Image (cartoon, rainbow, N blue to C red):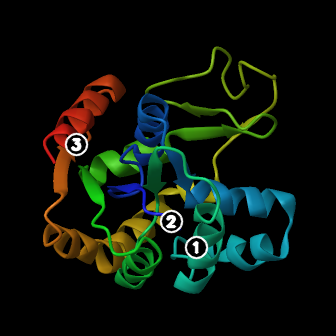
């Protein structure tokens, strides 16, 4: 991978990493790489990789480092525009080491989106996904006009298996055990900042941009 600015969004599931990543990518012209989206695309397409990771994702466990590194490495091998924005990677110290190796060791900009467990459960358990077009709604923040039906294509809205409360709590446990150590790791890099993610989308976005400008 050629030397480019790498920005990483850390935070528990439901903290809004995907939403903020899309806005940041549009604002700064970064290549947005979301490992969660990539893996779900593989599952929907019925690929060999998708069949290998589907059961893991539905249980709330993390996909093995070697599989994640494989898909991220392929994405980063292509033209990366003004920079790279990673959403959902790295999630373990092993993945962080791999990223450092393929990015020539340049220290990334790391933003940690902080959110309490109760709000994580509320946000994720309230999400509904359209079977047809993939649009996402939320029972608390962005309800469809007609209950259970997508505004855009009229297909059924469903609760994704990994958004069930029992799975969310397992995802939080895994996050604390395996991903939280990344906070200590990246604090030593000198380009680390934290943003409270409980506010509105625009409020959090403005805080992220302000934090990045100081780094």
Residue 143, percent from left and from top: 55, 23
Q: CA distance from mark 2 to mark 3?
A: 32 Å
Give residue 168's quadrant in the image: bottom left
| Residue 27 location (% of width, % of height) | 42, 29
**Mark pair 2, 1: CA separation:** 6 Å
* Relative side of 161 to 118, left or right: right
> Disc 1 or disc 3, which is closer to the eye?
3
- Residue bearing mark 3: 212
Q: Residue 189: x and y, percent?
A: 18, 69
Is 113 left or right of 128, judged from the image as shown?
left
Sooner in the amino-acid sequence: mark 2 or mark 1:
1
Q: Are marks 1 and 3 in contact (CB under 8 Å)?
A: no
Residue that label 2 marks: 167
Name the residue beneath numbered marker 1. Answer: 59
- Residue positioned 54% across, 56% down in the render: 164
Is residue 80 toward the left or the right of residue 176 in the image? right
């Amino acid at each position: 991978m050629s030397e480019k600015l790498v920005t990483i969004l850390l935070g528990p599931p439901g903290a809004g990493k995907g939403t903020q990543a899309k806005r940041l990518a549009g604002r700064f012209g970064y290549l947005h790489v979301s490992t969660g989206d990539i893996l779900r695309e593989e599952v929907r397409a019925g690929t060999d990789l998708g069949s290998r990771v589907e059961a893991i994702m539905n249980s709330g466990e993390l996909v093995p480092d070697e599989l994640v590194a494989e898909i991220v490495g392929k994405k980063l091998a292509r033209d990366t525009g003004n920079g790279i924005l990673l959403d959902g990677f790295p999630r373990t110290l092993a993945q962080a080491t791999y990223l450092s190796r393929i990015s020539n060791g340049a220290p990334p900009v790391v933003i940690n989106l902080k959110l309490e467990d109760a709000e994580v459960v509320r946000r994720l358990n309230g999400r509904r996904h359209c079977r047809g077009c993939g649009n996402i709604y939320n029972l608390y923040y962005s309800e469809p006009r007609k209950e259970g039906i997508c505004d855009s294509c009229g297909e059924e809205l469903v609760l994704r298996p990994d958004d069930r409360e029992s799975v969310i709590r397992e995802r939080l446990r895994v996050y604390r055990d395996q991903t939280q150590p990344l906070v200590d790791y990246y604090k030593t890099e000198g380009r680390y900042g934290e943003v409270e993610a409980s506010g509105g989308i625009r409020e959090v976005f403005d805080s992220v941009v302000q934090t990045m400008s100081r780094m």
